[in-house]
Amino acid sequence: MKKRNPLIQFIIGLVMLTAGGYWFMSSVTVTTGFYGLRLGNMQISGGLVVVPFIAGIIWLFLNIGSIGAKILTCLGLVIILASVIMSTQFVFRSRTLYEYLIILALIFGGAALSLQVLLAKPKDTGSKSPREEYEELENELDRLRKGK
Protein backbone atom coordinates (compact mmCIF):
# COMPACT_ATOMS: atom_id res chain seq x y z
CA MET A 1 0.00 0.00 0.00
CA LYS A 2 1.34 3.40 -0.99
CA LYS A 3 1.88 6.00 1.77
CA ARG A 4 0.00 9.28 1.48
CA ASN A 5 1.98 12.48 1.46
CA PRO A 6 0.20 14.91 3.79
CA LEU A 7 1.63 18.00 2.09
CA ILE A 8 0.32 16.96 -1.33
CA GLN A 9 -3.04 16.03 0.20
CA PHE A 10 -3.26 19.44 1.89
CA ILE A 11 -2.35 21.31 -1.31
CA ILE A 12 -4.87 19.33 -3.38
CA GLY A 13 -7.55 20.03 -0.77
CA LEU A 14 -6.68 23.72 -0.73
CA VAL A 15 -6.80 23.91 -4.55
CA MET A 16 -10.19 22.14 -4.59
CA LEU A 17 -11.55 24.45 -1.88
CA THR A 18 -10.29 27.55 -3.68
CA ALA A 19 -11.66 26.44 -7.06
CA GLY A 20 -15.07 25.57 -5.61
CA GLY A 21 -15.20 28.80 -3.62
CA TYR A 22 -14.27 30.87 -6.68
CA TRP A 23 -16.84 29.12 -8.83
CA PHE A 24 -19.52 29.62 -6.16
CA MET A 25 -18.62 33.29 -5.62
CA SER A 26 -18.64 33.97 -9.35
CA SER A 27 -22.27 32.83 -9.51
CA VAL A 28 -23.41 35.43 -6.95
CA THR A 29 -24.28 39.02 -7.84
CA VAL A 30 -24.38 41.60 -5.06
CA THR A 31 -26.63 44.62 -5.44
CA THR A 32 -27.56 47.47 -3.16
CA GLY A 33 -30.48 49.80 -3.32
CA PHE A 34 -31.26 53.08 -1.69
CA TYR A 35 -30.37 52.50 1.91
CA GLY A 36 -32.93 52.94 4.62
CA LEU A 37 -34.06 51.15 7.73
CA ARG A 38 -37.20 49.09 8.01
CA LEU A 39 -38.56 48.38 11.49
CA GLY A 40 -41.73 46.34 11.24
CA ASN A 41 -44.21 48.33 9.15
CA MET A 42 -42.26 51.56 9.56
CA GLN A 43 -39.79 52.59 6.83
CA ILE A 44 -37.12 55.14 7.81
CA SER A 45 -35.60 56.84 4.76
CA GLY A 46 -31.88 57.12 4.16
CA GLY A 47 -31.69 60.74 5.22
CA LEU A 48 -33.33 60.12 8.58
CA VAL A 49 -30.97 57.24 9.32
CA VAL A 50 -28.06 59.65 9.82
CA VAL A 51 -29.93 62.00 12.21
CA PRO A 52 -28.90 60.14 15.43
CA PHE A 53 -25.27 60.15 14.27
CA ILE A 54 -25.36 63.90 13.48
CA ALA A 55 -27.04 64.65 16.83
CA GLY A 56 -24.41 62.56 18.61
CA ILE A 57 -21.56 64.41 16.88
CA ILE A 58 -23.05 67.82 17.75
CA TRP A 59 -23.58 66.75 21.37
CA LEU A 60 -20.04 65.33 21.48
CA PHE A 61 -18.53 68.63 20.31
CA LEU A 62 -20.60 70.64 22.79
CA ASN A 63 -19.82 68.37 25.76
CA ILE A 64 -16.70 66.27 25.10
CA GLY A 65 -16.84 64.19 28.30
CA SER A 66 -20.48 63.16 27.94
CA ILE A 67 -21.13 59.41 27.99
CA GLY A 68 -24.56 59.96 26.45
CA ALA A 69 -23.01 61.72 23.44
CA LYS A 70 -20.61 58.84 22.88
CA ILE A 71 -23.45 56.30 23.16
CA LEU A 72 -25.65 58.27 20.74
CA THR A 73 -22.77 58.59 18.23
CA CYS A 74 -22.02 54.87 18.41
CA LEU A 75 -25.74 54.06 18.13
CA GLY A 76 -25.94 56.31 15.05
CA LEU A 77 -23.02 54.43 13.44
CA VAL A 78 -24.66 51.08 14.22
CA ILE A 79 -27.95 52.26 12.67
CA ILE A 80 -26.14 53.45 9.51
CA LEU A 81 -24.22 50.17 9.23
CA ALA A 82 -27.40 48.14 9.79
CA SER A 83 -29.27 50.07 7.10
CA VAL A 84 -26.47 49.51 4.57
CA ILE A 85 -26.32 45.80 5.37
CA MET A 86 -30.12 45.46 5.22
CA SER A 87 -30.24 47.07 1.77
CA THR A 88 -27.65 44.65 0.33
CA GLN A 89 -29.11 41.85 -1.79
CA PHE A 90 -27.43 38.66 -2.95
CA VAL A 91 -28.75 37.21 -6.21
CA PHE A 92 -27.69 33.72 -7.26
CA ARG A 93 -27.23 33.26 -10.97
CA SER A 94 -29.01 30.31 -12.51
CA ARG A 95 -26.88 27.16 -12.58
CA THR A 96 -27.67 23.56 -13.38
CA LEU A 97 -27.94 21.00 -10.61
CA TYR A 98 -24.86 19.27 -12.01
CA GLU A 99 -22.79 22.46 -11.66
CA TYR A 100 -23.98 23.02 -8.09
CA LEU A 101 -23.11 19.43 -7.17
CA ILE A 102 -19.62 19.88 -8.59
CA ILE A 103 -19.22 23.17 -6.71
CA LEU A 104 -20.33 21.55 -3.44
CA ALA A 105 -18.07 18.53 -4.01
CA LEU A 106 -15.10 20.82 -4.62
CA ILE A 107 -15.79 22.99 -1.58
CA PHE A 108 -16.58 20.28 0.96
CA GLY A 109 -14.19 17.68 -0.49
CA GLY A 110 -11.34 20.17 -0.47
CA ALA A 111 -12.18 21.29 3.06
CA ALA A 112 -12.29 17.65 4.22
CA LEU A 113 -8.90 16.85 2.66
CA SER A 114 -7.28 19.93 4.16
CA LEU A 115 -8.83 19.45 7.59
CA GLN A 116 -7.87 15.78 7.61
CA VAL A 117 -4.23 16.84 7.39
CA LEU A 118 -4.56 19.75 9.82
CA LEU A 119 -6.43 17.76 12.48
CA ALA A 120 -4.42 14.54 12.18
CA LYS A 121 -2.79 13.28 15.35
CA PRO A 122 0.99 13.43 15.15
CA LYS A 123 2.69 10.09 14.69
CA ASP A 124 4.81 8.79 17.54
CA THR A 125 8.37 9.25 16.32
CA GLY A 126 9.91 7.92 19.49
CA SER A 127 11.21 11.35 20.43
CA LYS A 128 11.25 12.56 23.98
CA SER A 129 8.68 14.87 25.46
CA PRO A 130 9.75 18.46 26.12
CA ARG A 131 9.72 17.71 29.85
CA GLU A 132 12.11 14.76 29.39
CA GLU A 133 14.43 16.86 27.21
CA TYR A 134 14.42 19.62 29.83
CA GLU A 135 15.28 17.19 32.63
CA GLU A 136 18.07 15.66 30.52
CA LEU A 137 19.54 19.13 29.87
CA GLU A 138 19.30 20.01 33.58
CA ASN A 139 21.15 16.79 34.51
CA GLU A 140 23.85 17.48 31.96
CA LEU A 141 24.24 21.05 33.25
CA ASP A 142 24.56 19.77 36.82
CA ARG A 143 27.18 17.24 35.66
CA LEU A 144 29.16 19.97 33.86
CA ARG A 145 29.01 22.28 36.89
CA LYS A 146 30.30 19.55 39.20
CA GLY A 147 33.07 18.67 36.75
CA LYS A 148 34.73 22.09 37.13
Image (cartoon, rainbow, N blue to C red):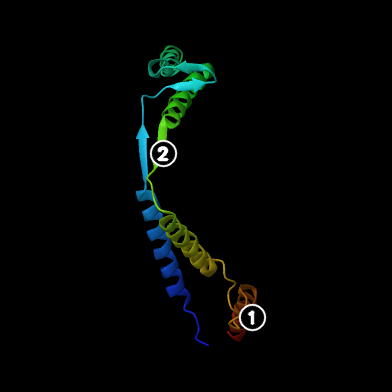
Task: Identify whether 49 is placed above or below 140.
Answer: above
Residue 135 in picture, x, y percent from top left:
64, 77
Q: Residues within 10 Å of mark 2 (few under 14, many from 20)?
A: few
| Location of mark 2 (residue) | 90
Is tag 2's residue or tag 1's residue first in the polypeptide sequence? Answer: 2
Residue at x 43% of width, y 25% of height: 80
Task: Identify whether 25 is placed above or below 109.
Answer: above
Residue at x 47% of width, y 17% of height: 43
| Identity, as a three-letter code, of the amino acid under mark 2 | Phe
| Location of mark 1 (residue) | 139
Tell me the element at label 2. Answer: strand
Task: Identify whether 107 is placed above or below 8.
Answer: above
Q: Residue furthest bottom?
A: 1
Q: Nearer the viewer, mark 2 or mark 1?
A: 2
Tell me the element at label 1. Answer: helix
Q: Quadrant of residue 11?
A: bottom left
Residue 131 in picture, x, y percent from top left:
64, 73
